[in-house]
């Protein structure tokens, strides 16, 4: 049996103020409740928390004391935020905030139901038309998260007679959707076209349909999928292709339309796009963009659409307006890539491991959890919020600091950050 580790609170002088608060009411291990936490993940996390307490390196779940931007107030300190999904710096944009406030005045805060029954209002219709026009597809469907959009697209359209062929670094929401649908799953090596061809060849004629799934920008590694070659293989083998645009919408392409625009690929050659409305688009929600008949079916055959509450009016209005702002303020994409180049080049000059990043998502791959925690804490103490990511979000011994550039970062702050990273690694030698 896996008994959760008992955390003996460290003396208060050893703890940072946040850890003091975090563990002040931390629940102690109760033998009577052992069955509930008698699982490997709980055992692993209790052990990890114990090590974090000893090293004073727990900096997850930092609470912002106000709006997030390139800077944020945390624990009474102004920190430079280097791990925010706000790629275009649109959080706090006056037009977007005003749209959300006006939506509350007209539609209030909730919808009173699921979309299929009593939860649809005109904001949803406008948002979906805006998304499909932006992505240049026939139709689109909005959800309360990108996670639910992936669940709806995959579990709604595929089943155990099909096979899913996915990049080994695909997002967890994709894996969960495949499991939910009971679809046999095969993986191909990350961004490896020969591996994809091999898996397609081995599964050709076995399943009813083959579904290839890749991401526009990979959320933990920052590299871009080789879409033209994937599309060619999809067409050669008669497969179906789903591209998750969570981190590439608003980031890739001259107009921010995504990975298809980045490569100059006709979007009609991709069967399904999914994406998020909470990253470059500063709201909540997700979407599916596809053919009109596919979207019409998913309104009646996609469980997350049928059985989950509708996207709230302020979120729908914020997402709708953000896309319009993006189209009118393309300078944000240019500034985002200028800042990305500064950070990429600065980190490359140190010969540290940043993988194959070629986008605003830039990992500093540390290896062990402890190394990632120490770097994150060092940067936090220096005035930078740069969060660590560990297993199961990334493979074992591939823990990292996941950096995200934004359009509104100041270049001089990026140079300061690079210098702090350099000092940290210099101190290890």
Image: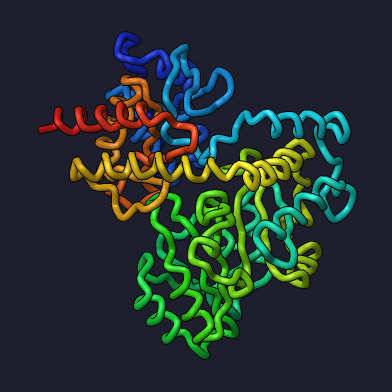
Q: Is residue 391 visible?
A: yes
The answer to whether residue 175 of the structure is visible from this angle is no
Q: Quadrant of the C terminus?
A: top left
Compared to residue 144, the image places residue 236 above or below, namely below
- Residue 311 vs residue 91: left or right? right
Q: Give the image location of residue 198, x and y in percent.
A: 38, 82
The chosen color scheme is: rainbow
- Residue at 31% across, 44% down: 344
Question: Which residue shows up at 71% across the image and 59% down it?
Answer: 133
- As drawn, 202 above or below 9: below
Residue drawn where x is 35% and y is 52% of the image: 357
Q: Position of residue 346 (x, y in %)?
A: 26, 39
In the image, 426 versus 91, the foreground residue is 91
- x and y percentages locating residue 336 in the rendered image: 46, 42
Q: Quadrant of residue 328?
A: top right
Residue lying farthest left?
429
Q: Kindly give the residue lying farthest to the top in the view shown.
A: 13
Q: Nearer the viewer, residue 104 or 33?
A: 104
Residue at x 49% of width, y 37% of height = 407
The image quarter containing residue 155 is bottom right
206 relative position to 380: left or right: right
**With respect to residue 117, does 13 lie above or below?**
above
Q: How many marks?
A: 0
Quadrant of the image occupied by residue 199: bottom left
Farthest bottom residue in view: 205
Taking the image as shown, residue 268 lies to the left or right of residue 356, namely right
């Amino acid at each position: 049996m896996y008994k959760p580790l008992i955390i003996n609170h460290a003396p208060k002088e050893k703890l940072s103020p946040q850890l003091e608060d975090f563990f002040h009411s931390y629940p102690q291990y109760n033998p009577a409740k052992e069955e509930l936490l008698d699982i490997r993940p709980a055992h692993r996390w209790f052990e990890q928390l114990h090590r974090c307490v000893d090293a004073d390196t727990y900096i997850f779940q930092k609470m912002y004391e106000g709006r997030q931007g390139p800077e944020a107030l945390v624990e009474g300190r102004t920190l430079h935020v280097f791990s925010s999904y706000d790629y275009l710096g649109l959080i706090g944009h006056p037009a977007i905030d005003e749209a959300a406030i006006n939506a509350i005045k007209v539609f209030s805060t909730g919808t009173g139901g699921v979309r299929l029954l009593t939860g649809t209002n005109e904001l949803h219709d406008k948002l979906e038309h805006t998304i499909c026009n932006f992505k240049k597809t026939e139709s689109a469907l909005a959800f309360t998260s990108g996670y639910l959009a992936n669940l709806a697209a995959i579990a709604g359209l595929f089943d155990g007679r099909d096979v899913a062929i996915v990049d080994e670094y695909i997002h967890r929401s994709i894996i969960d959707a495949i499991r939910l649908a009971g679809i046999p799953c095969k993986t191909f090596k990350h961004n490896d076209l020969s591996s994809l061809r091999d898996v397609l060849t081995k599964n050709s004629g076995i399943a009813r349909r083959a579904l290839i799934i890749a991401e526009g920008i990979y959320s933990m590694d920052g590299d871009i999928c080789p879409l033209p070659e994937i599309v060619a293989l999809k067409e050669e083998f008669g497969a179906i292709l789903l591209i998750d645009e969570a981190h590439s919408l608003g980031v890739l392409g001259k107009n921010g339309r995504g990975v298809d625009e980045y490569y100059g690929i006709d979007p009609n050659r991709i069967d399904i796009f999914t994406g998020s409305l909470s990253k470059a688009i500063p709201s909540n929600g997700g979407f599916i963009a596809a053919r009109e008949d596919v979207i019409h079916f998913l309104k009646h055959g996609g469980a997350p659409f049928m059985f989950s509450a509708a996207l709230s009016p302020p979120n729908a209005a914020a997402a709708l307006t953000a896309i319009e702002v993006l189209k009118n303020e393309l300078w944000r994409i240019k500034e985002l890539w200028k800042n990305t180049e500064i950070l990429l080049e600065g980190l490359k000059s140190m010969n540290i491991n940043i993988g194959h990043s070629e986008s605003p998502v830039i990992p500093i791959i540390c290896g062990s959890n402890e190394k990632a925690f120490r770097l994150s804490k060092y940067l936090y103490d220096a005035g930078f919020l740069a969060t660590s990511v560990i297993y199961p979000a990334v493979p074992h011994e591939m823990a990292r600091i996941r950096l995200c550039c934004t359009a509104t970062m100041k270049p001089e702050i990026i140079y300061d950050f690079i210098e702090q990273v350099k000092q940290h690694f210099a101190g290890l030698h």
